[in-house]
Image: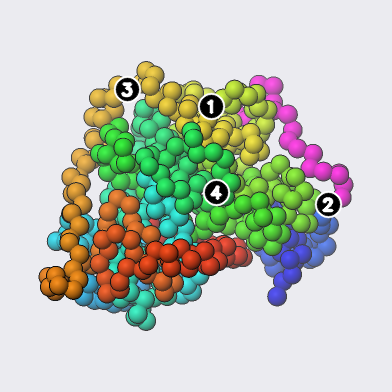
Amino acid sequence: MPTLRDIQREQTDYFAFYRMGRASAWSRHRRRDAIRNLEFPRRHPARWPGFSPPPARPGPQTFTEPQPYKKSQEQIKKEGPSPAVQRRAKRLEKLLAQEGMRFEKVLGWGGFGMACLFSMDGGERKVVVKIELEGRDSIEMERRNYELMRDAHHVLHMYNLAAEEAIENSDLAAGGLFLEFMERGTLEKWIVKMANERKTFSDRALWTIFDCLVRGLTGLAYPGKQWRGEESAMDAGEAVNPLVHFDIDPTNILVGGFGMYGNRAHSIAPIHKIGDLGLGQVYNSRERRNVEQVWCTRQAGKLYLYTPEQFTEEWDWHASAPAANAAPTAGNYRETMNTWQMGWTMYALITLCWPNEKKEPFVYNSKVFDREVRDATYGGDLMYSGRYDDTDRDLRRLVAQCLYHTPRSRPTLKELQILIGDKMKSRLDKSEEEGRVWARRFYGEPERRMPAPPPRPAHGPGHGAPPGRERWNMGAHPPIRLGGGARARFGQVFSNESIVDLEKLRRRRADEDHRPVIRRQPQPRRFWRD
């Protein structure tokens, strides 16, 4: 069993390769002697020296041109599900058919489990059933994260279906989730479509999507908050205990429909929501000082999406938790990590390219809202390569600021909302009507969204037998539910269980341990395929 110091030496060696753009060439076996003899923590110089100054005349030659998107993950994985996955899907189909749900197709699969699309109510409503085939810890962790996001409009919703007991009582899976179906699939699919058509997103569309993503980040920054309207950081106060996602990228941004969501109309672009909360963890000051936890989550997420908080050379000087020693970047797992990964998503929308394997820091002076900042950004090519000058300069500058190395240099969520709101009120490249026409042509005509049916009257003693058990509740705000065996339901949720006494529920929730599970080097899930 490796000790913590073994893990620290190994990660120090790995991330040295990562910063050189050679992570794919690193091998634990070949590097074992070098790892054993590695000086850790470093003593000379006394601290990390920082970045070199930028070139006097930056231009296209300063930055490596990134590779364009050519195929989405769903196109790369042309072969269908394996026979084992197909057998599981068939068993799930039979199991949920008894609950009034009809199997549509397998959306995705992987080492952890699979996701299938089911329809209900004669096909008018669809839901994604995500099941875990091996352990149970990760799906319970994901369930708790979705519970915390139940009132956020721009984070995927989890539904509380009575059919879940059928899965738990079977030997089919270790656990399951019922999730909102987003009819237009992943954002990556639309980036690939735009790249293949050799076109670019309009400035108005980019600002509109940016606004969606920032509101999703605001939901993540305030887990458990009951949003009366749309997510807004204006009066929410400081994000003390944010949910750090670790895996925000175009494959985990889901595209839905046009129309009203909450109190906001989405007509220029469909609503975009953040999904796949399986790696997310709530961090406060105590967690950021937990040595084992911060080191073991240093490799959480996809390789190309590691944030400066994970890959910075600053770690090499700290044998404990860097945040406990006032390190400005290393181990500072806050909502600003989500901002950085969201910045890469916007980078992909502007460039229609993958980020390079080697990150290229470029020292960039700019004014972030009302403060002067001099820091290294990983989006310098947006401003100085000349390749993206046809995109709104204000947008490119704001995305480059989101990609600043140091967390405190990046715009806050409140600053982002103000800047985006002001920009969307100004004159952009397309009028709102032109934007609507473009959106419907590119994304396809929006499907008619069926309104939720009114709740049925409760049945009890003296009311006669119910005509049929309501098997699902899919309102705009899914009911609160607990993980594990607890099945608490609020409002009109019909099942074989009675409504749990609210005071008893509050005591039970207070007793539950919601601390994140520490997993060494958790692997990213790729459940979402359209």
Q: Residue at x 42, y 58 (%)?
A: 147
| Mark 3 element type | loop
Q: Position of residue 520 (x, y in %)?
A: 61, 65
- Among the two numbered marks 4 and 3 on one chain, the one whose residue lies closer to the N terminus: 4
Establish if 517 lies above or below 299: below
Residue furthest to the top: 427
Within 10 Å of the Cα at label 4, are there few (<14), some (14-19), or many (20+) other Cα atoms? many
Q: Position of residue 13 (x, y in %)?
A: 73, 57
Residue 66 lies in the magenta-colored region = yes
The residue tagged with tag 4: helix, strand or loop?
loop
Label 2: which residue?
42
Q: Which residues are magenta?
A: 42-69
Q: Earlier in the sequence, mark 4 or mark 2?
A: 2
Disc on res. 242: 4
- Tell me the quarter of the picture where residue 93 sits: bottom left
The residue identified by callout 3 is: 430
Q: Nearer the viewer, mark 4 or mark 3?
A: 4
Q: CA distance from mark 4 to mark 2?
A: 31 Å
Q: Residue furthest front?
A: 462
- From the image, tell me which residue sits under label 1: 397
Q: Amino acid at mark 1?
A: Arg
Q: Nearer the viewer, residue 330 or 80?
A: 330
Q: Residues within 10 Å of mark 1 (few under 14, many from 20)?
A: some
Labelled pair 1, 2 in contact (Cβ < 8 Å)? no
Instruction: For the residues labelled 4 and 3, say whether their Cβ atoms are less than 8 Å apart.
Output: no
Query: Tag 2: residue type?
Result: Arg
**Disc 3 to disc 2: CB gap under 8 Å:** no
- Three-letter amino acid code at the position of disc 3: Lys
Q: Is residue 452 left or right of residue 59?
A: left
Q: Residue at x 64, y 45 (%)?
A: 308
Does the CB distance between marks 4 and 2 fall below 8 Å?
no
